[in-house]
Amino acid sequence: MEKRIKLLPYIAIDGIPTFPDSEIVDLYKRMAADGTAATVFSDGEITSGEDFLNATKHRENRLYVAFMDGEKSGVAWLNRFEARFARMHWCLFSNQWGKNSVEIGKEVIHTIINMKDGEGNYLYDMMLGIVPSNNKMAVRYCEKCGGVIQGSLPYAALKDGKSISGVIVYYTREAENEIT
């Protein structure tokens, strides 16, 4: 049976990207149309589809597009790589809100945390997220998807150009195995 959820990376294979530039720009436009772009990019660094494209092409970001039953359902990206962990960010599109959102989130986490290099070593032992403390819905969603709340830090997130506290959420293979 074919998996209902697929996660496709935005990479170049033999110089050809897996998604054209226009589709990456459209991912941001989708977030904007859903009303989530301002929350997802609350630090104000990304304010347009072109900004999102440039961030995914020219900065140290690894972007993945999630599909549910063949329909684009969200995005996740990693950055700030250190040792064998990275910062994780994601956004689910409105076509999946309240339906398959937790199932998609768990599969995204499972797929990324279990990626291996060519020698069979895990690429990541942990993924770390910082969610603005005032975004209670996102914090609950992260927990439902297997995130472990480590606590909060003052001034760890930005909202409208001002520093606010952020909830520290992490994902590991061990934590994932405890909830499955």
Image (tube, rainbow, N blue to C red):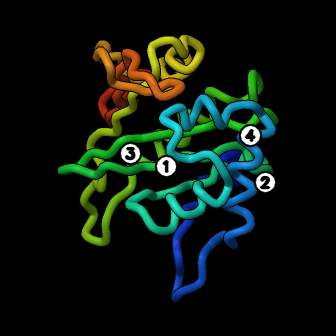
Which numbered disc, 4 or 3, marks the residue that appears first in the sequence? 4
Q: CA distance from mark 4 to mark 1?
A: 17 Å
- In the rendered structure, are the residues bearing label 3 and label 1 in contact, judged by CB atoms less than 8 Å apart? no
Which element is circle 2 on?
Answer: loop
Which numbered disc, 4 or 2, marks the residue that appears first in the sequence? 4
Above/below status of 58 relative to 177: below
Question: Mark 4 highlights which residue?
Answer: 32
Which numbered disc, 3 or 1, marks the residue that appears first in the sequence? 1
Which element is circle 4 on?
Answer: helix
Q: CA distance from mark 1 to mark 2?
A: 20 Å
Q: Amino acid at mark 4?
A: Ala
Which is more foreground, mark 1 or mark 2?
1
Residue 114 horizontal/vertical position (percent): 38, 49
Which of the 4 image quarters holds residue 138?
A: top right
Question: Mark 1 highlights which residue?
Answer: 77
Q: Amino acid at mark 3?
A: Ile
Q: Residue at x 33, y 24 (%)?
A: 156
- Quick one: label 4, few (<14), some, or many (20+) residues within 10 Å? some
- In the rendered structure, are the residues bearing label 1 and label 2 in contact, judged by CB atoms less than 8 Å apart? no
Question: Mark 2 highlights which residue?
Answer: 70
Question: Mark 3 highlights which residue?
Answer: 113
- In the rendered structure, are the residues bearing label 4 and label 1 in contact, judged by CB atoms less than 8 Å apart? no
Which is more foreground, mark 4 or mark 2?
4
- Quick one: label 3, few (<14), some, or many (20+) residues within 10 Å? many
Q: Residue at x 49, y 49 (%)?
A: 77
Q: Amino acid at mark 2?
A: Gly
